[in-house]
Amino acid sequence: MIEIPYSISKEVKIKVNQVLEEISDFFITLCEDSGDFDVHLQYIFPSFLVRKEFDRCKDIVYDIRDYTVDKFPHVLKPLYQYALFHLIQWYIDVTEEDEFIGVDISDISPLSEDDEFIIKNINNLESYKEFLFDDHDFLDVDNFLTIYFANPDILKKFNIELNDYIDLMPYDIRERYLCTNRNKQNTEVELEELIVRLIYTAIKQKEKDPRRLRETKETELSDDIAHILQAGLSARDVVIAREQPYGFALKGIGELDFFIYTQSNSTFSPIAIGENKEWNNFTKHFKQLIGYMNEDIDFGFTIIFNKETNLKTILKNRETFLREFFVELNGKKYFETIELTRGFKELKDIVISTHKNPENGTLFKVYHFIANAYRPEREEAAKQARSNK
């Protein structure tokens, strides 16, 4: 049987594996009858792996089906996790709801809260993509590698062991990972990209525990992100300063949540500044950010720390605000949003606004992040799943 990272009874585990058997058997039968293994395996594995190791990919699917029916406890390796995750998604995509037979759970009595949760969701295939896996790191190997090539030490902060994910790396990347020494790795990624990826990864790590994140203070979140940034950038002589005096404020010099700079060869070079505030202060803190910046700053970033507002509302209102943003002085508009883009390479939930420095006409970008701790629907689902109703 395929093991599940929940403390559940054997009877419940058998039922889950029966569902997985139905999914994997459906896939295998369809491919065998049609002779289209090469077509459908593209939905389950990275295309380079299907092309180079076709038979191995087939064997993995057969292995998954076999695991669901034998009596051995199978803990899936990342490549198998990747295949199972996408196999479930493939099944959801190609079948209608009434085609999924599911399992009968009327004869099972839950022995624990975990039993209750799994039983409640046992015929909800979307939930399988969550409760079957400790994490989804196998989906983020490209992002982890980008960070690794820039600074290998930073992944230690996230307990990521890239050796476990070698099978998911394209062959050229795999060779580069295995052969490149640490000194060369520090120059592989542009500094701006590395900072953006580190902020993104730090936020995603914090979002894994939304209840704890919701109890985190604004300054504590900023401290945590600054610590990760410093660990990931110290090899490049980059300094992350918190609450740094800089730029304009209503009364004297303002204090920045994040001020990132280098100090080498007796030369001070500012890189970026950032602000982390709760959603109801976003308009104010974005204007603060613009006021704190100058033409010597490469880029800025904002982090919305959301604890009480629907995420869709924030996304919609933030986009409207950014599209219409400008600062008016003596009848002229400054800092208008020249371009607003969604996504930074494969990181789809970063928004980037582009503005112009009035001092010299150069352009600068502001990267916009959200640390979302407000997930009432999922919290309620978890409560109901564990209730005695």
Image (cartoon, helix red, strand yellow):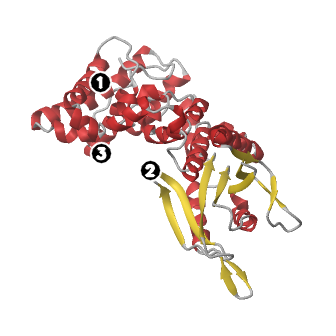
Q: Quadrant of residue 87?
A: top left
Residue kind at label 3, given as amino acid type: Asp
From the top left corner, tell me how far across and down residue 275 is, in percent: 71, 56
Of mark 3 and mark 1, the one earlier in the sequence is 1
Callout 3 secondary element: helix
The kind of secondary structure element at disc 2 is loop
Q: Is residue 233 visible?
A: yes
Identify the amino acid type marked 2.
Answer: Glu
Q: Earlier in the sequence, mark 2 or mark 1?
A: 1
Q: In the picture provided, is 107 more to the left or to the right than 22?
A: right
| Residue under the point 30% across and 36% down | 45
- The residue closer to the viewer here, 138 or 105, is 138
Q: Quadrant of the N terminus?
A: top left
In the rendering, at what x and y percent does residue 334 appear? 66, 78
**Tag 2 or tag 3, which sits nearer the N-term?**
3
* Numbered tag placed on residue 315 in the rendering: none
Residue lying at the far front of the rendered structure = 265
> Which label lies toward us, 3 or 2?
2
Secondary structure found at label 1: helix
The label nearer to you, 2 versus 1, is 2
Q: Position of residue 290 (x, y in %)?
A: 70, 67
Residue at 80%, 51% (x, y): give it. Answer: 243
Mark 3, residue position: 93
- Residue reaching furthest right? 251
Q: Residue furthest bottom?
A: 331
Q: What residue sits right under mark 1 in the picture?
A: 64
Pointer 3 with pointer 2, Cβ within 8 A: no
User: Label 2, on which residue?
Assistant: 346
| Picture layout, residue 78 above or below residue 326 | above
